[in-house]
Amino acid sequence: MSADTRGRILGSAMELFATKGYAQTSIDDVLRRSDAKPGSLYHFFPGKEDLLIAVLEAHRAGIDALLFQPAWIGFDDPIERVFALMARYRMLIVASDCEYGCPIGSLALEMHKARKSVRERISANFAAWTDAVHRCYLQAADRFESGTNLRELAEFTLTTMEGGVMQSRTFRDVSYFDRSVKQLRQYVQALMKTPSRRVAAPKKRVGGSKAHPPGA
Amino acid sequence: MSADTRGRILGSAMELFATKGYAQTSIDDVLRRSDAKPGSLYHFFPGKEDLLIAVLEAHRAGIDALLFQPAWIGFDDPIERVFALMARYRMLIVASDCEYGCPIGSLALEMHKARKSVRERISANFAAWTDAVHRCYLQAADRFESGTNLRELAEFTLTTMEGGVMQSRTFRDVSYFDRSVKQLRQYVQALMKTPSRRVAAPKKRVGGSKAHPPGA
DNA sequence: GTCTATATACGGATAGAC
DNA sequence: GTCTATCCGTATATAGAC
């Protein structure tokens, strides 16, 4: 029963903060889920906020292995990867009966008055997400009209994800997410060279697109 | 001292829930700010959650007089009105040193597991917002390419606002909001007939646009 | 309708033995 | 490092006089 107590506590806190939020999660919740005792928890983490910081750092450290890599299995095209990432969120939404919320986004709103050390860790998570998406767009830079600001597009992709997830959770209806992603897709299309120009492109996607769910 | 005690309590709760969130606001906070006593509060509201419901209904009822109308003073063009609304949010962000968060968006994330009666009121607020923006786009329907889904565009406008506000608050930097709004502007442009086609339109706006802040 | 005083529960955190 | 027991503040809500 002593197999990495710290890890169990951390994992439990990660799950609970993601689903219930920080304030709504009591130390006792964490203790029960991780089958640990107060003495252990406070041995590893001086206080609840330190536990949160550790959770945020774990998120940041695992973002590639736990989010991007799984999402990108089977997708090589950088643009398709962006939408495969969106499809990943869609899956999480559906799997949770539309109760899914981006853990970082939720904490971002809840923790906006918290200490700087907390807020910086949340910012770092957003930045890591945006960086990865930015890198995707950069790999496809030659397909965009010259002068297109791909950094801003990556930020806008995060905006779309967060706004779409918020609405799908509130209305308990994935289609809100799908429609937001669809608009983003059309926007990206409009920013690219060549294409059929018209933004309301029907179904003339290149390939692999059918692997995406409705909205993607 | 008896001038509409209920109203004072409600108004105080509205402000506090917006800035501190629901859980972080104690009944005592509301009491002190409204200069009321427990007996009064519980006379009007059976419990804290009922107070929240009243707040959400007040938001919904006042959305036109308190949000849209002020934002639209001096703007007649329906498209410009959409971005004037965004400019309104920008003003709120700047005025609060980037601590502003959309009250409904924040509550939406915090209250996602709350009773149905609460969640429905939050949904109603989102719907009212989207409806108003939808009406703006409909008024300019003739300027869009036929077949453009203006309802989806209105939802996407909400997505952009919420996602942009979330990032500007997290990074404590309005420019995140500005850039998201800029992308939306370019997308709307791309969906319209005629225009210079190229989406990266520099500064060739029709008129009144200079009244908008940077990002709009 | 409004007041003062207070019941009752639960939260984060600590003490100190083992 | 882990345990049991517990302190102590704060929170929602109530009681009951006026």
Image: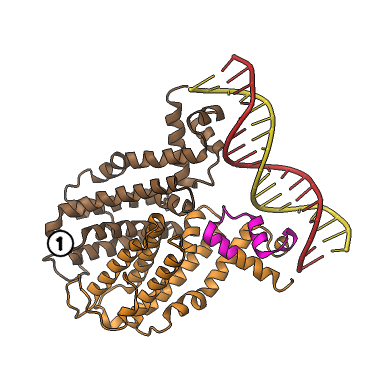
Chain colours: A orange, B brown, C yellow, D red
Q: Residues within 10 Å of mark 1 (few under 14, many from 20)?
A: some
Q: Quadrant of the C terminus of chain B?
A: bottom left
In percent of width and height, residue B91 lies at 34, 49
Relative to B8, say whether B49 is above or below: below
Tell me where residue B96 appears, x and y as whole percent.
Answer: 42, 48
From what the image shows, is residue A198 above or below residue A162? below
Q: Which chain does tag 1 point to?
A: B
- Is residue B208 in view? no
B100 or A42: nearer the viewer: A42
Highlighted magenta segment, given as a residue range: A13-40
Task: Name the residue rendered at 31%, 50% in the picture.
Answer: B127
Element class at badge 1: loop
Q: Does A38 lie within the magenta span? A: yes
Residue A89, can we see it? yes
> Can you give x and y, in whole percent of width and height, for residue B198 in the image?
18, 71
Between B21 and B94, the one lying in front of the other is: B21
The reply to whether the magenta stretch includes residue A109 is no
Question: Please, what is the three-letter code of the amino acid marked with disc 1?
Answer: Phe
